[in-house]
Amino acid sequence: MPGLKEIESRLRTVHNTKKITYAMKLVAAAKLRKAQEAVQRSRVYSDSLAGLLRQLSAELSGNESSYALMEKRETVKNVRLVVIGGARGLCGGYNSNLHRKVEAAITEIQSKHPGATVSATLLGRKPGEYFRRVNRSYTKALEELPEDVSRWPIDDVCREIETDFISGAVDAVYLVFTRFKSALSQSPTVEMILPLDPEALTGAGTAVAAGEGTATNGVSIFEPSPQDVFTAVLPRVFRTKVRQAALDAKASETGARMTAMDAATKNAGELMKTLTRLRNKLRQGKITSQLLDIVGGAEAIS
């Protein structure tokens, strides 16, 4: 059994750790509110863009597949993964769950397209560290990213991927990220973003399609033409998907960190209670032993 001094030292250590984890929880909670607001604003914009695409699709009468970003290749030889992960640890299983999803996505792609080469574009420090640890190669890694997602070079990354896809260097692009549901619930997700699927962009199942006010009254007039507007909107849709995923990933990381620090704070409190009871038990035993020595000495004298 540890001694009294050792227990008191452990108590001080756990107490200091509890203060740190509690402070980290408060910081994460403050950041989470901002991240949630950014996710919600971005989803409103994405839904509005989906509504515009539905109108354009109705004007084009099913000819969307002729556009470059919607071109489906008969044989998929090169696949690009865009992995959006965390910047730091201390967020529970957030990073490890995403890494398992990456491995599952690679396995599924290789089984679906035998012989296909899988490359990766990484956003976040943890995906870069993971790929190097497991000796997986990657095309590009942006690891030193700002805390604010709006300052990430997402447009530059998307522009490079668009160029590779249109030139034929890449046949399909998948997005691997963690979708934010709540501070307690985040879901690692794999989503194909190129070629863009006209049914996914304009079909049912989106928040706008299910909500009120999605129907349009009257006639929409597009200038200079529906074809030109559709061509201009498609790259914006692609980039919006990637930016939305980045916002979801940052909110998920922050929510996971807040939850993990809250659990660590509670565990530290429970450990402090256990150590305090053990310390009091040792103190009581020591005092009892001293009293017995005093009584024994008094009896010996008398």
Image (cartoon, rainbow, N blue to C red):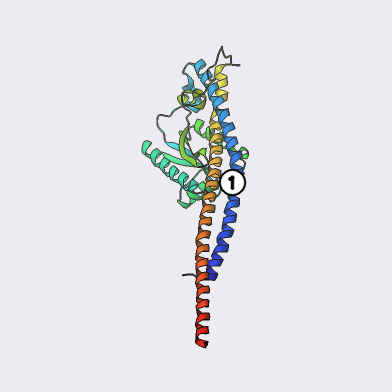
Q: Residue 92, can we see it? A: yes
Residue 117 percent location from the top left of the image: 43, 40
Residue furthest front as drawn: 302
The percent coordinates of residue 302 (x first, y second) are: 52, 87
Instruction: Report if residue 115 is visible in the image.
Output: no
Residue at the spot x=55%, y=13% of the render?
217
Q: Quadrant of residue 52?
A: top right
Q: Nearer the viewer, residue 73 or 246?
A: 246
Q: Position of residue 123 (x, y in %)?
A: 54, 43
> Circle 1 sits on which residue?
28
| Badge 1 amino acid | Ala
Badge 1 density bin: few <14, some 14–19, many ≥20, Cα 10 Å: many
Q: Residue at x 59, y 55 (%)?
A: 20
Asked where in the image residue 234 lies, by quadrant, the reply is top right
Q: Nearer the viewer, residue 31 or 79?
A: 31
186 relative to 37 in the view: left or right: left
User: Residue 49 at x, y = what percent?
Assistant: 56, 25
Residue 215 sits above or below residue 180 on the image? above
Callout 1: helix, strand or loop?
helix
Q: Is residue 1 toward the left or the right of residue 36 in the image?
A: left
**Between 46 and 158, which is closer to the camera in this rendering?**
46
How many marks can you see?
1
Report the residue at 60% width, 40% height from top: 33
- Up-down: is 69 above or below 149? above
* Residue at left offset 40%, top offset 32%: 75
Residue nearer the viewer, 255 or 118: 255
